[in-house]
Image (cartoon, grey):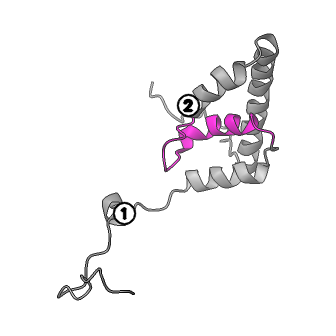
Amino acid sequence: MVAGNVHAQGEARMEISSEYLADLLIGIAKAQTAVIDAMERANPGFRNTHAVPLLQIAANMRAGDPRLIDLPSRVLLRMQGRVALDNKAVRADLERLSNPQPATARDASAATAPAAPAAGGENLDFSANP
């Protein structure tokens, strides 16, 4: 038997909208937040000492370009703050991450490199006032 999206005859394939998936992610994050809140009540300081740092690692917060796999952890991390989580924001993240733009040739060193001096060296007099 081959693993994958194999459906028996007559079964309909389930299509999940990004709005539904965003609601599902938020609901799961609320349940996980309840567990973190219970741990915080039993052991004050648990959230900031243990939970949030590990969530930041799981959410891959240092990555400049978030991935779809990081989204559930990022949603849970947002739930730890005081700001209410909006379905529209999660849905926008889902849509952006599930429909990636075509990869462009980006060179990080070229983006941060200083501009090349003008040909002929006419701008090399640093003693002159601009």
Left or right: 111, with 17 as reference point: left
Q: Nearer the viewer, residue 98 or 66?
A: 66
Q: Amino acid at mark 2?
A: Ala
* Disc 2: CA contacts within 10 A as few (<14), some (14-19) or many (>=20): some
Give me the disc on residue 22.
none
Q: Position of residue 109 (x, y in %)?
A: 31, 60
Q: Is residue 78 magenta?
A: yes
Question: Element under label 1?
Answer: helix
Q: Position of residue 32 (x, y in %)?
A: 74, 25
Q: Which one is earlier in the sequence, the residue at label 1 or at label 2?
A: 2
| For residue 59, above or below residue 86 | above
Give me the disc on residue 58.
2
Q: Which residues are magenta?
A: 58-82
* Disc 1: CA contacts within 10 A as few (<14), some (14-19) or many (>=20): few
The residue identified by callout 1 is 112
The residue positioned 27% from the left and 85% from the top of the image is: 123
Question: Depth-wise, is mark 1 or mark 2 nearer the camera?
Answer: 1
In which quadrant is the C terminus drawn?
Answer: bottom left
User: Separation of disc 1 and disc 2 at Cα?
Assistant: 28 Å
Q: Amino acid at mark 1?
A: Thr
